[in-house]
Image (cartoon, rainbow, N blue to C red):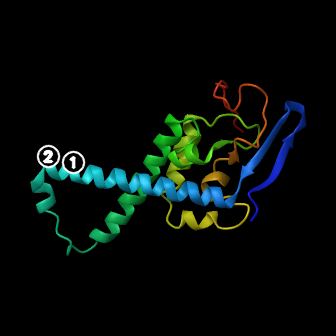
């Protein structure tokens, strides 16, 4: 199994970005999804304890409730991913564990607030997860935001890009 895909070199800036393998990307997704559902269940329990009448008032037989549930889940997952990548500077909880990071594909710099927001929002698009199939994995939330998820251990950048010191972001 290929552990990581080919490197993209930027000789002038002495940057080598090694894209994270499809296996690591899939593991990121599974870890992030597990953390998300733990958070949702915990919030549901908390709401049920504080406002028990809300839980009693939910009628599962209501037409369209399942569709709304799926829509809201996609939206909340996108917001969850936005906030985690914003707080952890290009990393979700899965990326923290697998030592990968989302960066700008042009120069390896840290993603901006806007890119983190649009990466998260892109994940709310139905069937977006299927766009990650293939090797190398290049899902829509990467394509639409001109970002790439890299293997931090194998990537090399000029000082200040991946270690969190870079404050400016590159945009087209």
Q: Quadrant of the C terminus?
A: top right
Q: Quadrant of the N terminus?
A: bottom right
Question: On the image, numbered disc 2 is attached to which residue?
Answer: 50
Residue at 15% x, 49% y is 49
Q: Considering only vertical position in the picture, is 164 above or below 91?
A: above
Label 1 environment density (alpha carbons within 10 Å; few <14, some 14–19, many ≥20) = few
Whether residues under marks 1 and 2 lie with C-beta atoms below 8 angstroms apart, the answer is: yes
Label 2 environment density (alpha carbons within 10 Å; few <14, some 14–19, many ≥20) = few
Q: Considering only vertical position in the picture, is 155 above or below 78?
A: above
Q: Position of residue 117 (x, y in %)?
A: 52, 43
Q: Position of residue 10 (x, y in %)?
A: 86, 39
Residue at 46% x, 57% y is 33
- Spatial CA distance of label 1 from label 2 is 6 Å
Q: Is residue 75 left or right of residue 52?
A: right
Label placed on residue 46: 1
Q: Considering only vertical position in the picture, is 67 above or below 105?
A: below
Q: Is residue 13 left or right of residue 47?
A: right
Callout 1 secondary element:
helix
Residue at 48% x, 41% y is 84
Q: Nearer the viewer, residue 147 or 23?
A: 23
Q: Position of residue 168 (x, y in %)?
A: 66, 26
Q: Position of residue 6 (x, y in %)?
A: 82, 54
């Amino acid at each position: 199994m290929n552990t990581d895909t080919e490197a993209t070199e930027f000789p002038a800036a002495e940057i080598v970005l090694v894209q994270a393998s499809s296996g690591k990307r899939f593991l990121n997704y599974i870890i992030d999804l597990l953390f998300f559902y733990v958070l949702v269940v915990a919030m549901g329990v908390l709401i049920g304890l504080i406002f028990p009448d809300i839980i009693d008032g939910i009628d599962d037989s209501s037409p369209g409730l399942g569709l709304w549930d799926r829509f809201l889940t996609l939206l909340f997952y996108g917001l969850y991913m936005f906030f985690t990548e914003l707080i952890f500077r290009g990393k979700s909880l899965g990326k923290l564990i697998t030592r990968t990071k989302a960066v700008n594909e042009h120069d390896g710099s840290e993603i901006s607030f806007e890119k983190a927001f649009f990466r998260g929002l892109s994940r709310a698009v139905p069937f977006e997860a299927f766009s990650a199939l293939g090797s190398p994995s290049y899902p829509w939330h990467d394509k639409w935001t001109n970002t790439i998820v890299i293997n931090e251990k194998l990537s090399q950048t000029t000082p200040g890009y991946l270690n969190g010191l870079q404050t400016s972001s590159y945009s087209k």
